[in-house]
Image (cartoon, rainbow, N blue to C red):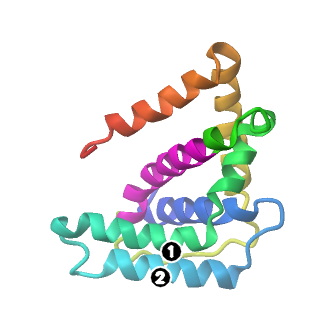
Amino acid sequence: MTRAPIVVAAVLALLAARDAGGGVPTDQLRGSIDLVLKIVTDPELKKEARTAERRKRIREVVNEIFDFTEISQRCLGRHWQARTPAEREQFVALFGDLLENAYITKIESYSGEKIQYPGDVIEGVSLVANYRSQFNAVIQRSGYPDLVARLKAKQVERPGS
């Protein structure tokens, strides 16, 4: 598989997750993807010393259209209601960080491949279902605190943490 489909899938998964049920207008996708691609192809921002700034700019674009609270709620499913406001806030931050770091290197690997925009974006729906299944299994087996501990451990495992 070439990197272009990986990059597009990663970006679409992030963008589509905001409104997985109703679809995301292609024009909105194009505009957001164009902004992200402008960031990742900027020769100055490609420099290793500017990694943090590049990632911050990507996050800013994604945050404009990606509703981390909504996707977090969908991924926790029935377990969301049992969480306190503080637990919800913590989970949204941890899960957002997990998503960002799962896709950021794929997005940053873009090197000029042609971007194709599919008619229907289903990646966001499968993303939700996949995480909901994983999170539910952990909560059922060892409880919500263990899920949080695992998400925190992922942050620590990451290079540069």
Where does the image place residue 119, in percent across and percent down from the top left? Answer: 75, 73
Tell me if label 2 and label 1 are in contact, CB under 8 Å: yes
Q: What element carries label 1?
A: helix
The quadrant in which residue 79 appears is top right
Count of marks placed on residues: 2
**Along the viewing direction, whichever of 76 and 16 lies nearer the viewer:** 76
- Magenta stretch containing residue 102, yes or no? yes
Where does the image place residue 93, in percent across and percent down from the top left? Answer: 53, 49
The quadrant in which residue 50 appears is bottom left
Per the image, the residue denoted by label 1 is: 61
Image position of 40 with respect to 7: above or below:
below
Where does the image place residue 112, in percent across and percent down from the top left? Answer: 38, 77
Q: Which residue is drawn at 83% across and 66% down?
A: 22
Where does the image place residue 65, in percent across and percent down from the top left? Answer: 62, 71
**Mark 2 neighbour class, 10 Å CA radius: few under 14, some 14 to 19, many 20 or more:** some
Q: Which residue is drawn at 42% across and 63% down?
A: 107
Per the image, the residue denoted by label 2 is: 35
Residue interval drawn in magenta: 89-108
Query: What amino acid is labelled 1 in the image?
Result: Val
